[in-house]
Image (cartoon, coloured by chain):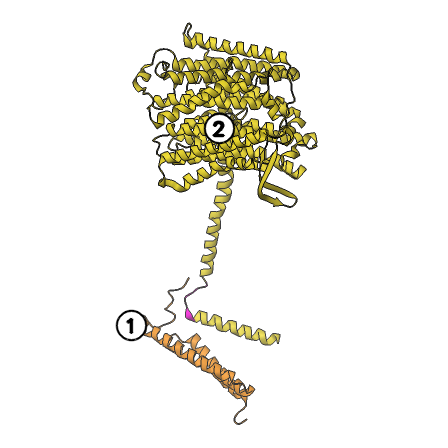
Chain colours: A orange, B yellow
Amino acid sequence: MIGPDTAWYLAVAGFLFGTGTLGVLIRRNPLIVLLSIEIMLNGANLALIAFARHLNDGNGQIFALAVMAVAASEVVVGLGLIVALNRKRVPLDVDRLSSLRG
Amino acid sequence: MIYGAWTCLLSPLAAAGAITLAGQRISRRTAGYLATLSCFVAFGGAVATFVSLLGREPEQRAVVSTAWTWISGGSYRSGFEILVDPLSVMMMLIVSGVGALIVAYSIGYMDGDPEERRYFAYMALFVFSMLLLVQGGNLLLLLAGWGMVGLSSYLLIGFWHERPSAIAAAKKAFIMNAIGDATMALALFLLIKKAGSLEFGILGGEYSSTVATLVALGLLGGAVAKSAQLPLQTWLPDAMEGPTPVSALIHAATMVTAGVYLIVRTHAIFESAPHVADLAAGLGAGTLLIAGLVALVQVDIKRVIAYSTMSQIGYMFLGAGLGAYANGMFHLMTHAFFKALLFMAAGIVIHALTAEQDIRKMGGLRDLMPRTYQAFLVGSLALVGIFPFAGFFSKDSILAAAMDHGAYGYVLWVAGLAGTFLTGLYTFRLLFLVFWGEPSPFVREHFHALPRDVVGVTLAAPVAVLAVLSLVGGWIQWAPLWHPIETWLQTAAEPTVTPASWQEWVTSALALLLGLGGIYVAWIFYGVRRFAVPRFAFGQRILERKFYFDELYDALFYRPTVWAAKGLYRWVEDPLIAESSASLGQDTRDLGRLVAKVQTGLLRTYALAIASSVAVLAIVFVAVK
């Protein structure tokens, strides 16, 4: 096998996932939260492909493709929501969007 | 022969179905003709059956015909079967014959009623039910017919459903009868348990005295309720709320005598429980006295006749309870003739006076409607038992039978003789008040003669036929001299008492004298009015209140039930059930409010919860591995 060992790929994937999680937890701008989620998804994708190579099994790649499709749809919906919020002059801050509390 | 019996049973049912299904496609008159025709066909079938039975040897006169197996479970089996024997044929002839005449009379009486079709469908249904009762080949079918006559009686008493009093009377009759039906059903359950079958034959089997007594008591309960005897008699006078032909057919001629038929049909079990048979005779004697006394003060023409019906059925119970089955059945037959006659003559009076039933407003009708007067007179003489009218032959032989029953029998004999005096008194009080004297202002204002068309003919013809039957119907049997009915019923129910000839003669003479005495007293006070009617305020009040039976049952059953229901509502339902369901709802809501606090609406809290949960899960997963 050419290139670095599978462990390195997993390390990068873990790093990406951790970065995304932190972004979701820390940032309050919904746009950035969406971006962070994309980073988490990409971390997961990287792990999937790394394992696919490691186990010599194509299923992992198929899953990665499916995740990309879902991510794309999710971004469309998410961005649409954010645009709609902006049009209503609602402040773009996830902490202030809490009218659904019990 | 069997075909005749099945025709007899099914033709009224066919008419009831046809009238119901045809609805408004046939005229009201046609519905009446259809019902009448079906009853005459039934009568024809009964006559054919009777004739072919006559041609057989006495021992071979009981035939069972099974149409199909109706119920079968385990070792138990009941067929849909009819029993043709001398007893059931006699009842078939009475029910279909008198029934046909009364349904024909209804064509005139119910003319112009907006719901005639419903009326005739009910009448045909009743005749079918009654025939099922008397022809049913086992106790289960008998009970089915028993219940169905109760239903038709309920429907017909409440026929004028816009009158609240009619609805109340119908419900009262139904509930009183349901008590009897229940005791009967219990008796049948016991029989199934002990004998495993409900054929009539098992009644003669060997049972312990407890079982025999219980079964006989259960059957007696049913008989007492259906025949309006003590202590379940209060429904019959109220049942007069129904149309007059209904009173004549159901509450005089046929259904109310079903109790007598039941005792005669199941006589074997009563013979193995002699105390219950004595009780039946005693109840009959008590009823005939009480009803006779109450009849003295009634002011409604139909109620007087209703009380006389109760009293006459008392005589039949007396006979059947003593074991004089043939005499009881003979009186049942003659009573069907003269009581239907009295009711229908009274119906013509009511019809002529625009539905007035209060005898205090009547009077002087003798010259206005002479033929109705004659018919009523024939019926009254037959009822009192004056020679040579029908009641003389049938009633006296029942009383004579009482003399052959020891000391207890003599008590009943005295009660029955006292009853004949009362019968003469109340019957002719009614006759004199309605027909004698000068026409009252009310009569002069409201009287209109019978029309000479279909209405008049259908009203008059059956009355004429029954008047003739009330005269000659009794000649069939004169106990001391000839007794074909006793011979005819010999195989079905053999009498257990045989009064001697002198007892017959003595009883007849005494009963005739007492009956005439009653008529004479009535004549003095109400006919020629030589003396004013004496007044006994206290006694009169008791009689007008019908010995306070209604009030007693009210206090014993109705009020405690209402109190119990109110108490349960107040002390059980309200605090326990209503409260607990309300607090259950409140608690659920409180819990929901508590859980809702978790829902903060802050996106990052949720994300943290998910992330930390996943982290915990991952750590646990790794640690367990």
Could you tell me if residue B416 is visible in this image? Answer: yes
Q: Nearer the viewer, residue B572 or B92?
A: B92
Mark 2, residue position: B97
Does B601 lie within the magenta span?
yes
Magenta span: predominant SS is: loop
Identify the secondary structure beneath mark 1.
Answer: helix
Residue marked by disc 1: A87
Q: Position of residue B368 (x, y in %)?
A: 34, 16
Q: Is residue B280 magenta?
A: no
Q: Nearer the viewer, residue A19 or B165?
A: B165
Indicate the position of residue B36 as horizontal and vertical percent values.
43, 32
Q: Give the residue type at disc 2.
A: Gly
In the rendered image of this protein, does residue B151 appear above or below residue A59?
A: above
* Magenta part of the chain: B598-603
Q: Residues within 10 Å of mark 1 (few under 14, many from 20)?
A: few
The relative height of residue A56 versus residue B456 in the rendered view (above or below) is: below
